[in-house]
Every structure is written in structure tokens, then in C-alpha cells.
Amino acid sequence: MTARVGVITFPGTLDDRDTQRAVRAAGVEAVPLWHRDKDLHQVDAVVLPGGFSYGDYLRAGAISRFSPVMGTVIEQARAGMPVLGICNGFQVLTETHLLPGAMLRNNHLHFICRDQKLRVENATTAWTSDYAQGQEISIPLKNIDGRYVADERTLDMLEAEGRVAFRYLTDGPTADGYGNPNGSLRDIAGITNEAGNVVGLMPHPEHAVEPLIGTGRTDGLGFFTSILKKLVNA
Amino acid sequence: MARVVVDVMLKPEILDPQGQAVQRALPRLGFEGIADVRQGKRFELEVEGPVDDAALARIHEMAETFLANTVIEDFTVRVDEAVRAES
């Protein structure tokens, strides 16, 4: 069986091609999807890639959230289809309320672009099963609206239910010394929904899948091999 | 044509680093005595037809679902009476 993963392009999306490439690197068929097309073309999962859809006008992800394709994505995600939102894609997912909380301007107001260490806090989601619980990975982070916020009750709920999927590694002997990169509450880099099929994070796994470029590591490949296993075993 | 104004502000508990940056710049520019600045968004909507309760209810719905993200922002809706009087 061949798994098919759709990658949506919105006006202003930047990382759709890299994401398609990462999907293929894991041995999965990548299907380009267009924001105005409601049809998901029989894909088994969807990735919302990074970029600046609609120029981040109004709020990052706020306009894309109402695109025709997202109507279908929201419906299918609620029915259990795996969805991964990276960076701007994560912002779109919080705007749809498929994931709780919201993304705001980095606390230091600067665009940030660097390799970022993360700890995988939940290795049971559709997109993280190929990682070990607590595994430390390094993948690129590049954004200005990366500060995750939610009210205390929501944060406590996320922690209690194990729904913080990734945390920025800010202390301990293996931390990179940069600290929290953007003021995200409780160092949250990514979260999952209750069912574990919808995951969003700010850093970019699709930029760390080939040893030749980027970090020189392939720490991001696990997202795409995880979904392959999930779909093939389904 | 009547104008309806929607003001969107970050909730009080949400950190506003842009407002803080503006506040910190003020003394340098010779503007003293401003203890805090919060930055928000203002939308001016030119409404076709009467601004009755039904129209305002629709605008309220628009603000709640689209113009503001109520996870992090509060909004107010008001009719700009000056524009209404002119028209």
C-alpha cells in the first residue's frame, strides 16, 4: 500500500516544496493541494507547511483558515485524519481551533532563524511515533510570530493530558544556551489534539531530512516516517 | 453610508511586546509620563443599507469569528455617529 500525504499551498506559502520533498524522502507519495480546491484528492494525511500565507495580514493564519480547502481539512481532521501544521501551518491550526491557544509576536520582536533544540514530550501521536519519549532533536526555527500563548487552564489541561508534544530545550547540560527563543508559555514548541492526529509546531522538521543541508542531521525525518508507519499499519 | 468601528485589543493578561517597545521609545523622544502602552487594531466598516440591530448582530459575529481571535483578543463594536450624521 502506498501512503499519500497532501501538502497544501496557500498564497504566500514558502515551504510547500521542501515539505513535499521531505514526505518523499520518507517513502511517502506527496500530493500537492491547492487552497481553493475543496477536494483532498484521496490523501491519507495533510501537512500545512510554513510561510507567510496572505502576508500574515490580520493575524498569521487567520485568512487561510477560511480557505475552501480548510473546510474539508477541519471536517476530516475531526474524523481522525492526521494533520501536521508547521510554523504558519501551526498558526492556521490554532486559528481553526483544532488546536487550542494562539501564536503571537516573539517577545523580543525579532525574526529568529537558527537550529533549535527540542525535546519530544509525546512520542505517541500520529506524527511522532518514530521518536523516543524525551528524545532531544535539533531542527531549524524561523519565525517572528512564534510565541505560543493560552490561558492557564488550557496550559494545565495540555500538561495533564500529555498534549505538549514538543518543548524548547532551555536548560540542562544538553541545552544550547539560547533559552526560550520567543517567550512561548511553558517553553511550548508544539502541541497535539486529544486524539493525537492533529499536531502543530513552530520549528521546521522538513528542513532537516537530508544530511547534506541544514543542520547536517536528519532529526526532522521522523515526522514523515512516523506518518508512513501510521498509514501503512492503518 | 454608515460607518461601524470595530476595535480589537489584546486581552489585558496577554503580553504586548510591541506596545512595550513603543512605551520605552517615548522618553527618548521627549514624551514623558506615559506609564504603559497597549497596541491594538481598528477596523472601519462602511456599511451598505441601514445599521439596525440585525446588521450590528452580523458585524458582531464577523468580529468574533474573523476580525478578532477571542482566545487572545477582546473587541468592541460601535456605530460612528459623526459619519452617520453627515450622510
Image (spheres, rainbow, N blue to C red):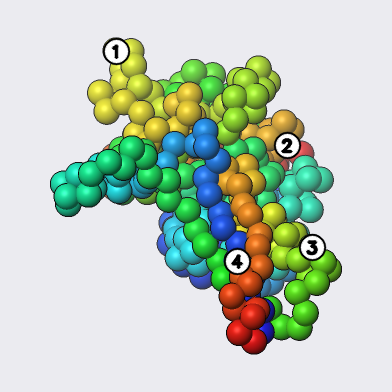
Of tags 4 and 2, which is closer to the observer? Answer: 4
What's the distance in space between the residues labelled 1 and 3, CA to CA? Answer: 56 Å
Q: Which residue is under mark 3?
A: B57
Q: Residue at x 17, y 50 (%)?
A: B30
Q: Secondary structure at mark 2?
A: loop
Q: Secondary structure at mark 3?
A: helix
Of tags 3 and 2, which is closer to the observer? Answer: 3
Residue A233's tag is: 2
Quadrant of the image containing the C terminus of chain A: top right
For mark 2, name the chain: A
What's the distance in space between the residues labelled 4 and 1, CA to CA? Answer: 53 Å
What's the distance in space between the residues labelled 3 and 2, CA to CA? Answer: 49 Å
Q: Which residue is under mark 4?
A: B5
Q: Which residue is under mark 1?
A: A173
Please provide percent x and percent y for residue A175: 31, 20
For mark 3, name the chain: B
What's the distance in space between the residues labelled 4 and 3, CA to CA? Answer: 13 Å
